[in-house]
Amino acid sequence: MTNWKVILNIAKTHLLTKMKSTVTASLGVTFGIGAYITLVSFMTGLNQMLDDLILNQTPHIHLYNEIEPSAKQPISLYEDFENSLNVVHSVKPKQSQLKIHNALPILDYLKKDKSVRGATPQMRAQIFYLSGSIELGGNLTGIDIMEEVRLSNFRDYIIEGSPEALRNLENSILLGAGLAKKMSLGVGDRVQVSTVKGAVFPLKIVGIYQSGIAEIDNIQSYANLSTVQRISGEAQNYITDINIKLNNISAALPMSQKLEKQFDVKATDINTANAQFETGSDIRNLITYAVSITLLIVAGFGIYNILNMLIYEKMNDIAILKATGFSGSDVQLIFMSQAMIIGLIGGILGLLVGFGLSVFIDQLPFDTEALPTIETFPVNMQFKYYLIGIVFALLSTFVAGYLPSNKAKKIDPVRIIRGT
């Protein structure tokens, strides 16, 4: 029967008598785990921030009418040319409304669907922002502001003013940050907008919107849906877009295909709309985990080398232990215990170092106009990263300790005592 108390005491004695080697091995684990925690927390936090920047502003499914050429040209309708190869040059898009047919019944249908978290109507209008004699082209989108806040974190992108002010005040506008800067306007000022038909409307600025994407902020503004409908001279059922958020984002593709056939509209799911972005995000995560695992493996090799050297230095001790009645398995357990103690101490210290560095990075100011709501560097301190860190520390030290300890198990004490 194994006497663990004796084995652990011998392992402790070995570690304390070779304090320099013990500290070096422990620090190898500490810095390996600490670097892993810091890197994976920072990189996943940064990736999450970039994902949120794009995906928070993208609906899971977007319904709209797309302008495209007719599938069948007039010549295809003549039976005389039915079996002929018809080539039509300079095909023009067909004249069609941007308005979604039966938009309000579609919204009611979607809101009753249990898989839908929310559906918001929008109306997009091309306008000109008037600043003295200058006309700046842009877009004005009519929205249900409080539903957008609930479903899309819209509040995070309002750097001045509030969404409640837009909801409560008719003829008001959330002006794009780039436009506000160009026209030297702020909350409380008025801006005149002109439709493509020439009608001019004054709107009060109740907030400044900044998406973090300069091209959008230079042209995009938001108003209440009813305000944009009135400016454009359209009825209350005139809706050009419906944005849908689902409870399960993985259902976006099949549901978009279903809605496209069911309501005869164009339906684009989030994965199709952001395919390139998703690929980039996956590659960044892959690089992050690859570098992190490499750090842990390097720490494991350091432990192996130190324990291997320790066994060569302790040859006489091993011979004496075997000569006094310790079995090969007992000797192996002694050196395995040393490895596991180093892994445990180094791993815990590594977690503390990683946590400390993550907290430090999280407090560093991160000031950029592209991301106005982010004040400090993003850090994702999830418990699973710390669990992975300590498990890998113990696993790597176990593997690193097993190989040299197995060699110690097979040492012949007679040959060492004879000096051969």
Image (cartoon, rainbow, N blue to C red):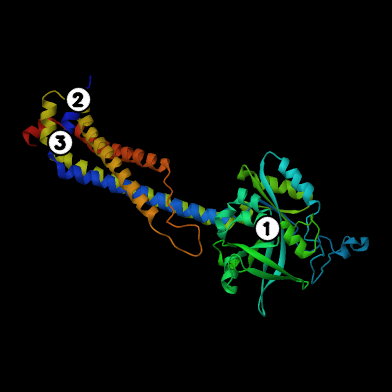
- Amino acid carrying mark 1 in the image: Leu
Q: Which residue is mark 2?
A: 5
* Circle 2 crowding by C-alpha within 10 Å: few under 14, some 14–19, many from 20: few
Which residue is at the front of the view, 133 or 335? 133
Which residue is at the front of the view, 54 or 389? 54
* Circle 3 crowding by C-alpha within 10 Å: few under 14, some 14–19, many from 20: some
**Cα gap from disc 3 to disc 2, whole angstroms:** 14 Å
Residue in view at x 72 percent, y 44 percent: 110
- Which label number is shown at residue 14? 3
- Which label number is shown at residue 169? 1
Looking at the image, residue 318 lies above or below residue 119: above
Point out the tag, 3 or 2, that comes first from the N-terminus. 2
Q: Secondary structure at mark 1?
A: loop
**Cα gap from disc 1 to disc 2, whole angstroms:** 77 Å
Q: Quadrant of the C terminus?
A: top left
Point out the tag, 1 or 2, that comes first from the N-terminus. 2
Which residue is at the front of the view, 112 or 150? 150
- Amino acid carrying mark 2 in the image: Lys
Q: Quadrant of residue 139?
A: bottom right
- The spot of residue 233 in percent (x, y) is 80, 64
